[in-house]
Image (cartoon, rainbow, N blue to C red):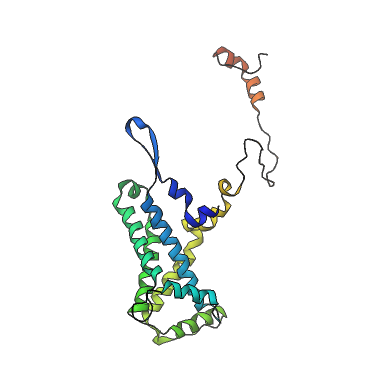
Amino acid sequence: MTSEILFFRSLFRNDKAELKGTQGLTYDSSKLLWLGGLAFHWSLIIILARHMRFFTEPVAPCIIFLQNIDGMFQLGSPAFYISGIFIFIALMYLLFRRIAFPRIRLISLFSDYFVLFLVLGITISGFLMRHFYKVDIYAVKRIIMGILIFKPLTITDIGLIFYIHIFLVSILFAYFPFSKLMHTGGVFLSPTRNLKNDSRMKRHINPWNYPVKVHTYEEWEHEFRGALKEAGLPVEKKR
């Protein structure tokens, strides 16, 4: 479970199945997709953790430490975060993959493109807000802290780019519970991940299952014994 959550073990091992001539059904993996997915998810986690400085006072030392590590390659002021570049490259690759590969494009739905463009818009607006259309960070924190204590503030001179950014983030949070993004929590509830692989030795029964009348094989064979013998099919009981 840990290797799946932190390093995407199943994606690293296998990504596609296809028929190849005399080899039959073969399984293959795309290491580039694995790297893209890993870069996107880890960058997103780091960015979300960094943003916790806007929601807490005082800011936890671990958040400050993570922020310093992420901005260690500082080019001018403000700091240039590594996670911002990685998530942009990963998003562009995932979007290119859905558009360029015919089989992926065939199974792609509107919701798949919507999430990619939404996160890409959040990333670009955040980058522009930090490096080009600079906003007052202290004013941003005042607004967010005001929302958290149910005393929202209105600061008109903070800049339009901030409200575009927060609008896109709000759409993402509202859309999240109804989308495929819920695989974030679903992986923890996957029976193939969090249960022992001993189903051949032990039968696992859900405790909330209600009694169900079943039709056993012995009953089915007894019911159709005549037809089975007439068709020449083997039966377990001769009588």
Number of residue marks:
0
239 is higher (above) or lower (below) than 172: above
Q: Which residue is found at the position 66% from the left and 33% from the top?
A: 214
In the orientation shown, which residue stands out farthest toward the left?
A: 100
211 is higher (above) or lower (below) than 91: above
Image quarter of residue 85: bottom left
**Res 122 seen here:** no
Q: Quick one: quadrant of the C terminus? A: top right
Q: Nearer the viewer, residue 193 or 107?
A: 193
Question: Along the horizontal axis of the image, is 142 left or right of 71?
Answer: right
Q: Nearer the viewer, residue 49 or 116?
A: 49
Image quarter of residue 169: bottom left
Q: Nearer the viewer, residue 119 or 155?
A: 119
| Residue 231: image location, x then y, percent | 54, 14
Question: Along the horizontal axis of the image, is 114 left or right of 201?
Answer: left
**Res 2 seen here:** yes
Image quarter of residue 212: top right
| Residue 237: image location, x then y, percent | 66, 17
Q: Which residue is found at the position 36% from the left and 63% from the top?
A: 117
| Residue 233: image location, x then y, percent | 56, 16
198 is higher (above) or lower (below) than 79: above
Q: Which residue is found at the position 61% from the left and 14% from the top?
A: 226
Q: Which residue is found at the position 39% from the left and 37% from the top?
A: 26
| Residue 222: image location, x then y, percent | 66, 20
